[in-house]
Image (tube, rainbow, N blue to C red):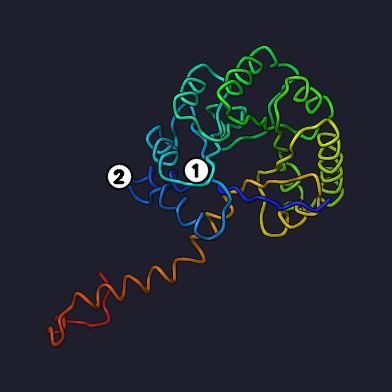
Amino acid sequence: MTQYLRLGINVDHVATLRNARGGVRPDPLRAAEIAVAAGADGITAHLREDRRHIRDDDIVRLRERIAQPLNLEMAATDEMTTIALKVRPRAACLVPERRQERTTEGGLDVVASRAQIEPVVKALGRARIRVSLFIAAEQAQIEAAAALRAPVIEIHTGAWCEALAEGHADRAAAEFNRIRAGARLAHELGLEVHAGHGLDYVTAGTVAGLPQVVELNIGHFLIGEAIMGGLAEAVRRMRAAMDRGRPDGFPAAPGNSDAVT
């Protein structure tokens, strides 16, 4: 099977940086525009209950100003369902959410939470919002997702990436085998298969080798790479702006010309 592999960029952590200082910069909308111009096929943003990073107005602006599909990550709650039905993103990915977690720490338990999840899946589906369920690559969870008639699952790759990062080769191999088997089962059940969480250049390349996976959603790693890889260019642009603003022949500052204050 040969199929184009889509890339969704998560801009949550741009908003995290903005909110740490307050104000409007850096703007997740601008980050989304840059990502799309660079080749992203879609933008993902997680509107959390506590609004710790993405805010309601970010979702509205992203929906209105980004031509590529917006994937709204959300908890399966009445509040988030109401927002999704109002904003009408192209897609909505249902994820577990706990206020005390730093990031999404695992997949949805679709088996245990079917009564909560099913009406949300139906409501979003009626509004023609493509629903995906963020789950571990476990047979019971995948079969439950199929039973709910959610058209898409996103396989949580975090445990595998974490095992690799910590040097646990055997555990990493077992986790990847589970991902591979889960992707195959989901495809056989008629589900579209996405994957995400913790992916970097190496692990994304590995997951890209799974023919059933048609979309990767990546955020934190790429925002970190942007900070490291883009700082030098930002400094050069700032130096040029300063030089343009300083008239020729302006006298040097008194004292030590090497001082930085």
Viewer-nearest residue: 169 or 149:
149
Residue lying at 74% horizontally and 39% vertically, measured from the top left: 193
Image x and y of residue 246, in percent: 18, 78
Residue lying at 13% horizontally and 87% vertically, measured from the top left: 249
Residue that mark 1 sits on: 12
Query: Which mark, residue 23?
Result: 2
Label 1 packing within 10 angstroms: few (<14), some (14-19), many (20+) = many
Q: Is residue 95 above or below residue 165?
A: above
Q: Amino acid at mark 2?
A: Gly
Q: Can the viewer see residue 137 in this picture? A: yes
Residue that protrudes farthest toward the top in the picture: 115
Viewer-nearest residue: 227 or 54:
54
Q: Amino acid at mark 1?
A: Asp
Image x and y of residue 222, in percent: 57, 55
Cα–Cα span, label 1 and label 2: 16 Å
Image x and y of residue 12, in percent: 49, 43
Residue lying at 27% horizontally and 81% vertically, measured from the top left: 258
Image x and y of residue 11, in percent: 50, 46
